[in-house]
Amino acid sequence: MSEKREAGPGRSGDQPEPAGTPADLARARAVLEGARRVLVLTGAGVSAESGIPTFRGTGGLWRSFRAEDLATPGAFARDPRLVWEWYGWRREVVAGCLPNAAHLALARWQTRREGVRIATQNVDGLHVAAAARVAEERPPAAGAQAQADERAQDHAKDLLEIHGTLFRVRCTRCRKREPHRSPIDASTHASLPRCGACGGLQRPDVVWFGEALDPDVLARALGWAESADACLVVGTSAVVQPAASLAVATREAGGDIVEVNPETTPLSPLAAVALRGPAAELIPALLG
Ligand code: BJW
Ligand code: ZN
């Protein structure tokens, strides 16, 4: 393990590294292999190759709306039908998508070695789906289902969906949460999902701009970040707070950042190694 607060393999000062070569991959592997605990911070880019559009950049718009226009409590208060229409569309897109090679490689890595935790900003559930699929891959002969379930639960303990999930709703009146997967009828205000307990309007159980993250979830994620020897940052523009600051917390505690992204981000200057390319290609190559 690289000593915390000292240069890790591949770091030259705090300069970003040129990326994409076998030597970069080898340096990134050395950082991760030398780390006892790793926090993996993912964003929309990890799901791009599953067919899910990212928020920003090409294809990041829905009609003429930006995420910043729709993912706010104000937008929902003004026009819940429009916001539900967007979420209904996103749920349909996501329901037709499967975890890609990056999600699966991360889930297999978690089963192979101790100390790997994932904090995802994504609300698509694909890390959970990948963990479930990996748990089924090698069912032991006896008590197969029970043991597969146990492994899936172990994964759940080491995975945080810090911005919530598309497939859960929360009542705007009594705050009751419940899983919700059926299609959304956003044709009229009256057809929007309603709480079975109090009749209040339900909303997607996700974190919108200007809303606080669940304090327990944030505290756990921050604890993971500060105790990690390395933070593997995959497919996030790293402009949304406090998510992006998790990687900074690892760095400030003396750990290394490894970034996987086709583009540079505000975290790139802090990274020991930056691998430039698509996650579904680079993550399996990196983690084996
Ligand atoms: C690939 C790839 C491939 C492409 N392989 N990579 C400090 C300064 C300024 C503002 C703030 C601040 N602190 C907080 C704020 C305000 C705000 C914020 O951060 N604003 C910024 C935009 C400036 N933050 C908040 O409001 C947060 N709340 C908060 O701070 O509360 C404080 C509070 C305390 C007490 C009381 C009340 C309040 C909440 C943020 C919630 C964000 N929510 C969303 C929507 C979630 C639900 C939903 O999905 O509908 O989360 S917005 C959206 O952005 C979503 C994402 O999780 C998040 C991050 O986006 P992400 O994942 O990085 O995606 P993209 O599209 O930006 O980037 C994709 C990347 O992938 C790119 O880099 C590509 O290059 C790359 N890529 N293909 C690998 N194949
Ligand atoms: Zn209710």
Image (tube, rainbow, N blue to C red):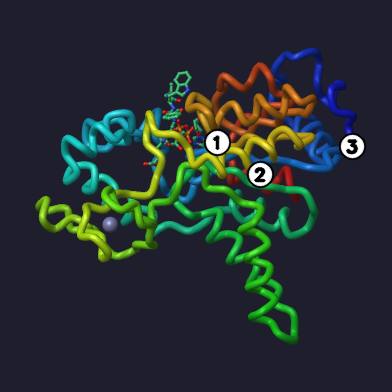
Q: Earlier in the sequence, mark 2 or mark 1?
A: 1
Quadrant location of the N terminus in the rendered image? top right
Q: Is 41 placed above or below 172 here?
A: above
- 233 or 201: nearer the viewer: 201
From the image, tell me which residue sits under label 1. 235
Q: Is residue 64 left or right of residue 99?
A: left
Q: Secondary structure at mark 3?
A: loop
- For marks 3 and 1, give the CA distance: 25 Å
Per the rendering, the mark at residue 1 is 3
* Amino acid marked by disc 1: Gly
Q: Earlier in the sequence, mark 3 or mark 2?
A: 3
From the image, tell me which residue sits under label 2. 283
Ligand 2 image-quadrant field? bottom left
- For marks 3 and 2, give the CA distance: 21 Å
- 106 or 288: nearer the viewer: 106
Picture residue at 38% right of the left edge, 57% below the top = 177
Circle nearer the viewer, 3 or 2: 3
